Image (cartoon, rainbow, N blue to C red):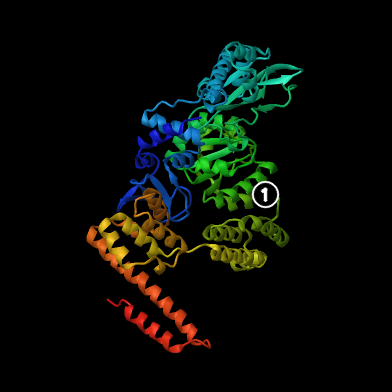
């Protein structure tokens, strides 16, 4: 556990702008910094960082927070890891509560690193294991780069670690040892070990590959731990991230062997998932380096089915996708073995748009001159296309169907619209409901509060001319009431943060001098007061139609209010 005082000390010694500049391209506008939001797709920058308040806020998607949450989201780390990153940046040593040290993530990483070193030493000393790895066409350089090792079958690892003073409970918790037949033993035995590392090059878990066919299962993974989640793993991301950023696309494949063989062929912007289940977490991590994905899944039915699901998920998360067509070979390993690295690189360059690949895959055993086969293809591909959120991409995919089937584009589009009409209506109705649920805060009232918090002179002008009852928004009314009640001396920073998150970005993009702000304030005072008068007059006019209400008094009130209307 990290003391709150230390966290505050770290935040005081860190500037959110400096941290953001290491990860984002910022442009100063007014007193704030703007950039395209890293958390949603947009064309106009709406992600703002306020250096004075040390917070960020996106006016598009609403994401906001301080420097700690910014690191958590951008670097895909948890709270404690974010604190450690910032502490290192601020050159502050973190003092942890000793009672929690044994179960800290730091302990897992240290132990996993030590275990990795033992596995590596085992491999160098074991000729049979080395011979097996070389038979899989894995070079000595790759063995070193990927920290590949070997697990012995004599339980010596567990004994070694216990001798070093590591508790048995930790070894079981971290997935290094297991309890079998009432005894604690090595989890990985007689297996080639592929350590799995995170983006910071820390070992989070292991994959063990049996070198004898009779050993089951063939592949054995670390269990789920605090730092190891199978659905989060991107094998090779520690080595690939720089190349992904440089080339601006990531190749994603199944497992670890294909990653290593691609790496050996000179294609290093490649990562592997465990199995074929692409997840939102995978995409969030990849999205820090690129928004382009090239899929190189196995060329069998299981790989194709996984590809269809993965493409839809990637498209929904605003990734541009292509498919590396490895046919007639099953995977990257087979392709490079049979065709060589030059042909592999050429195939990557010729990566296909998904509909092109899907259509070719589904028609490889079909006679596309037959009308029945064309309809079968259209009905197979359309459900995938309909899940693509981007209308331009969707239209492109439909045009590819037209090119292959020779069925007119309009006919395919009409057929598709008929199929998806009901679903589309439901979506539109839901969107309307969601919009109606949103609470609207009058932007003029928010800007009024922003200005009176900015200057005492502006504050005095505002207080003389605007009363609490003039406010329409219940939230802005409460804030204004509170400020007057506390004489603008309490919770000012907190209130400034609330105002900053709700203000229209157009108000703060341009740097303004005092006279410009004063002019803005007078314009807003006029707007707020006139709107209040207008609403009041309308209320009184409605009462004129009611019986048993003295009309003369109402008319006098309406006349008085009308005279107060500001015209200049």
Residue 268, placed above or below residue 352:
above
Q: Which quadrant of the figure has residue 460?
A: bottom left
Task: Identify which residue, 154 or 172, lies in the foreground.
Answer: 172
Q: Which residue is mark 1?
A: 364
What's the residue at 31%, 63% (across, down)? 462
Task: Identify which residue, 500 or 402, lies in the foreground.
Answer: 500
What's the residue at 67%, 51% (across, down)? 362
Residue 78, placed above or below residue 205:
below
The percent position of residue 251, horizontal first and vertical second, equals 53, 40
The percent position of residue 222, horizontal first and vertical second, equals 64, 27
Residue 483, placed above or below residue 121:
below
What's the residue at 39%, 28% (across, down)? 92
Query: Which quarter of the image is occupied by the C terminus?
Result: bottom left
The percent position of residue 224, horizontal first and vertical second, equals 64, 31
The answer to whether residue 139 of the structure is visible from this angle is: no
What's the residue at 51%, 40% (across, down)? 285
Drawn side of residue 473 relative to residue 211, left or right? left
Count up the numbered dots: 1
Using a 10 Å C-alpha cutoff, classify the residue at mark 1 as few (fewer than 14 neighbours), some (14 to 19) or many (20 or more): few
The percent position of residue 159, horizontal first and vertical second, equals 64, 12
Task: Identify which residue, 355 or 224, lies in the foreground.
Answer: 224
Q: Element at badge 1?
A: loop
Task: Identify which residue, 73 or 214, lies in the foreground.
Answer: 73
């Amino acid at each position: 556990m990290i003391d709150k005082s230390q966290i505050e000390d770290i935040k005081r010694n860190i500037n959110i702008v400096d941290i953001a500049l290491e990860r984002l391209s910022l442009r100063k506008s007014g007193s704030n910094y703007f950039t395209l939001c890293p958390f949603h797709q947009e064309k106009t920058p709406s992600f703002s960082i306020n250096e004075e308040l040390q917070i960020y806020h996106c006016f598009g998607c609403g994401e906001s927070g301080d420097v700690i949450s910014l690191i958590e989201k951008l670097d895909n780390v948890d709270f404690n890891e974010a604190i450690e990153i910032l502490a290192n940046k601020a050159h502050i040593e973190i003092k942890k509560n000793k009672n929690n040290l044994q179960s800290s993530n730091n302990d897992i990483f240290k132990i996993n690193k030590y275990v990795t070193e033992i596995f590596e030493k085992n491999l160098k000393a074991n000729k049979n294991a080395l011979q097996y790895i070389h038979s899989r066409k894995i070079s000595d350089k790759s063995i070193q780069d990927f920290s590949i090792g070997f697990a012995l079958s004599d339980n010596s690892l567990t004994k070694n670690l216990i001798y070093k003073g590591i508790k048995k409970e930790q070894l079981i918790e971290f997935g290094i040892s297991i309890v079998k037949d009432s005894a604690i033993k090595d989890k990985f035995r007689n297996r080639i070990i592929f350590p799995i590392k995170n983006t910071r090059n820390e070992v989070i878990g292991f994959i063990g590959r049996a070198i004898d066919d009779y050993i089951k299962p063939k592949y054995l993974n670390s269990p789920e731990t605090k730092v190891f989640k199978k659905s989060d793993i991107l094998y090779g991301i520690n080595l690939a991230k720089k190349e992904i950023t440089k080339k601006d696309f990531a190749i994603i494949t199944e497992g670890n062997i294909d990653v290593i063989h691609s790496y050996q062929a000179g294609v290093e912007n490649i990562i592997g998932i465990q199995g074929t289940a692409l997840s939102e977490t995978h995409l969030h991590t990849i999205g820090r380096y690129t928004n382009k994905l090239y899929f190189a899944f196995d060329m069998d039915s299981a790989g194709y089915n996984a590809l269809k699901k993965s493409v839809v998920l990637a498209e929904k998360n605003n990734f541009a996708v292509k498919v590396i067509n490895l046919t007639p070979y099953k995977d990257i390993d087979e392709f490079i073995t049979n065709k060589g690295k030059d042909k592999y690189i050429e195939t990557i360059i010729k990566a296909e748009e998904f509909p092109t690949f899907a259509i070719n895959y589904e028609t490889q055993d079909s006679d596309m001159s037959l009308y029945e086969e064309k309809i079968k293809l259209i009905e197979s591909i359309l459900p995938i296309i309909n899940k693509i959120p981007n209308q331009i991409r969707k239209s492109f995919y439909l045009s590819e169907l037209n090119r292959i089937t020779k069925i007119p584009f309009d006919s395919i589009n009409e057929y598709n619209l008929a199929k998806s009409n009901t679903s589309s209506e439901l979506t539109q109705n839901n969107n309307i409901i969601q919009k109606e649920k949103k609470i609207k805060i009058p932007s003029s009232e928010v800007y009024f509060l922003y200005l009176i918090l900015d200057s005492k002179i502006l504050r005095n002008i505002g207080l003389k001319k605007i009363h609490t009852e003039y406010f329409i928004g219940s939230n802005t009314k409460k804030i204004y009431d509170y400020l007057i009640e506390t004489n603008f001396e309490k919770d000012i920073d907190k209130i400034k943060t609330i105002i900053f998150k709700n203000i229209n970005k157009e108000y703060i993009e341009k740097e303004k001098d005092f006279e410009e702000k004063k002019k803005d304030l007078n314009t807003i005072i006029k707007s707020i007061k006139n709107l209040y008068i207008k609403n009041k007059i309308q209320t009184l006019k409605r009462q004129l139609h009611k019986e048993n209400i003295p009309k003369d008094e109402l008319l006098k009130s309406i006349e008085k209010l009308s005279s107060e209307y500001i015209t200049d």
